[in-house]
Amino acid sequence: MAPPIRIGFMGLSTTNLDASWKYAGAWANTAHIPYLLANPSTYTITALCNSSLSAAQSAISHYNLPPSTKAYESLSDLAADPDIDLVVCSVNIKKHYALIKLALLAGTDVIVEWPLATTLEEAEELTSIARKKGCKTAVVL
């Protein structure tokens, strides 16, 4: 059996959980996390990046992620982490381009919530980088 895919997660919040459908990143706690945590032989969350280090640490604690889960406030640090196979991006759409670009330039596969970017030009650039770096990408709903 293959080892679990090591996930670097961007945008897992513990804010406004009772109204999660109203804010960016809602899919993180309502869809992505339940699925990933229910399949530990397939996925393991090795790192989490939020807007602040304390927010990342809070989410690690709130979702009972392993103590070995790394907390980041900088995606460039998350993207450079050699222990990540796949970045899951669940942030405000306006941030997609910059954050995804860093992950792709580091050669890391990416899953991002729809849409990929805010403009066609940004989407085409991200697609080109992924192709050149040999990264797998998926845009999900």
Image: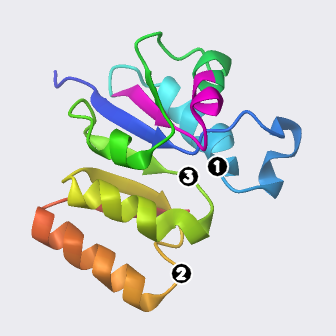
Vertical arrangement, residue 16 with respect to residue 129, above or below? above
Give the Cα separation between the discs numbered 1 and 2: 18 Å
Q: Which residue is mark 1?
A: 27
Give the vertical position of 90 relative to 36 (above or below).
Answer: below
Mark 2 nearby-residue class (10 Å; few <14, some 14–19, many ≥20): few
Callouts 1 and 3 close, C-beta under 8 Å: yes
In this view, 4 is above or below 138: above
Q: Residues within 10 Å of mark 1 (few under 14, many from 20)?
A: some
Left or right for 106, reference 51: left
Q: Amino acid at mark 1?
A: Trp
- Residue located at (63% from left, 62% from top): 92
Give residue 90's mark: 3
| Disc 1 from disc 3: Cα separation | 7 Å
Question: Which circle's residue, 1 or 2, is located before the other in the chain?
Answer: 1
Callout 3: helix, strand or loop?
loop
Magenta residues, start to end: 43-57
Q: Work out whether residue 136 can be spotted.
A: no
Residue 40 location, x and y as percent?
40, 20
Mark 2 belongs to which amino acid?
Thr
Q: Earlier in the sequence, mark 1 or mark 3?
A: 1
Tag 3 near tag 2, CB within 8 Å? no
Residue at image position (20%, 23%) is: 3
Magenta stretch holds residue 129: no
Position of residue 40 in the picture relative to residue 60 (left or right): left
| Position of residue 110 measured from the top left corner of the image (x, y, whole percent) | 34, 54
Q: Percent x, y for residue 24?
A: 70, 56
